[in-house]
Amino acid sequence: MKRLSISVFCGTAVAVLSLVPAFASPPSVTGTWKVEQSGANGTSVSTITLTQSGTGIVGSNAANGNGFTGTFVNDTQINGKWHGPGGAGWLTVYVTPNGHSFNGTWGYNGRSANGSFVGNKVLPPSPLSAAGTWHVTGAGGSTAFLGKMVCKQSGPSVVCLSGGVTLNGKQTPTDPRKVRATFNMGGTAGVFSFWFNGDNNSFNGVWWRNTTGTGDPAGRVVGQRALGG
C-alpha cells in the first residue's frame, strides 16, 4: 500500500511539473515606454512606466491614472490586467527578445479585444561616433554613395568607404554632430557633409562636385546605422 502511495505521488508530481511553463530568462521591460494605441476608442500616444521583478510586471500611466500588472507566461508573452478611471480589463503583450519593443491587444473584462497597441522603450542615444556600418539611401539628386558605407573614427577624424570612394573627414569643431569630408571620384573632387540625428544612429547628408561645398548639392542622402554596427 505504501509503495502504491509513493507511485501515485510521483506520478502526480511529474504531471504537475509538466504543466509548469518552461522558459529561460525573459527580457527586461523595466523603463519608460512610448505607447501608440488604436481601436474602438480611437488612437492615442501615451507614456507609461514599467517595473519588472522576475517574471512579474507592474506599471502606470501618470497622465490618465491607469495601472497595469502582468506576468511573463513564456519568454515573449505577458498576460496582464489594467485598471483605471475608465474601467478595468485584460492585456496580452508580446515582447521582442531584446526587450526594446512590444505589441499586443487589450479589452474590457469579459469582452473581446477592444484595440491594439505598439510600444517602444525610451532608450538613451548611442555614443556619438561615425564608426560602424551604415545603410545609405538617396533623398534627392544623384544616386551616388548609395548602399553600404563603412566608417572608422579616431578622435575627430573620420574615414568612410562608400561605393569604392574614400571619404576623408572630421567632426566640425563648432558642432561635433556634423562631419565634413572630401573625396575624389573619377578625377572629380568634392565635399560630402552629414550630420547625426538625435539618436546618433541615423544621419542626413548632402554632397557636392566641388571643393567648396557651396551651391546646389549634387545629391542628398540619409543613413541608418546597421544592426550591431
Image (cartoon, rainbow, N blue to C red):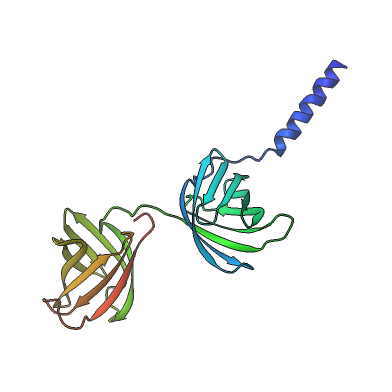
Q: In the depicted view, which residue is nearer to us: 130 or 106?
A: 106
Residue at point 68%, 61% (across, down): 113
Above or below for 6 versus 162: above
Quadrant location, the C terminus: bottom left
Q: Nearer the viewer, residue 30 or 226?
A: 30
Residue 32 place in picture, x, y as percent: 45, 51
- Which residue is drawn at the image coordinates 36% and 60% (left, top)? 226
- The percent coordinates of residue 4 (x first, y second) are 85, 21
Residue at 53% over, 60% down: 118
Residue 122: x, y in percent? Answer: 42, 54
State the residue at coordinates (24%, 75%). Answer: 206
Report the residue that reaches farthest toward the right.
1
Query: Would you say 125 lies left or right of 38 here?
Result: left
Residue that protrudes farthest toward the top in the picture: 2
Q: In screen coordinates, is 200 left or right of 91?
A: left
Q: In this orientation, which residue lies closer to the viewer: 92 or 90? A: 90
In the image, residue 90 sits, relative to residue 113, either above or below, namely above
Q: Quadrant of residue 143?
A: bottom left
Location of the N terminus by quadrant is top right
User: Does residue 44 appear left or right of residue 92 in this picture?
Assistant: left
Q: Quadrant of residue 19?
A: top right
Residue 63 % position (x, y): 50, 56
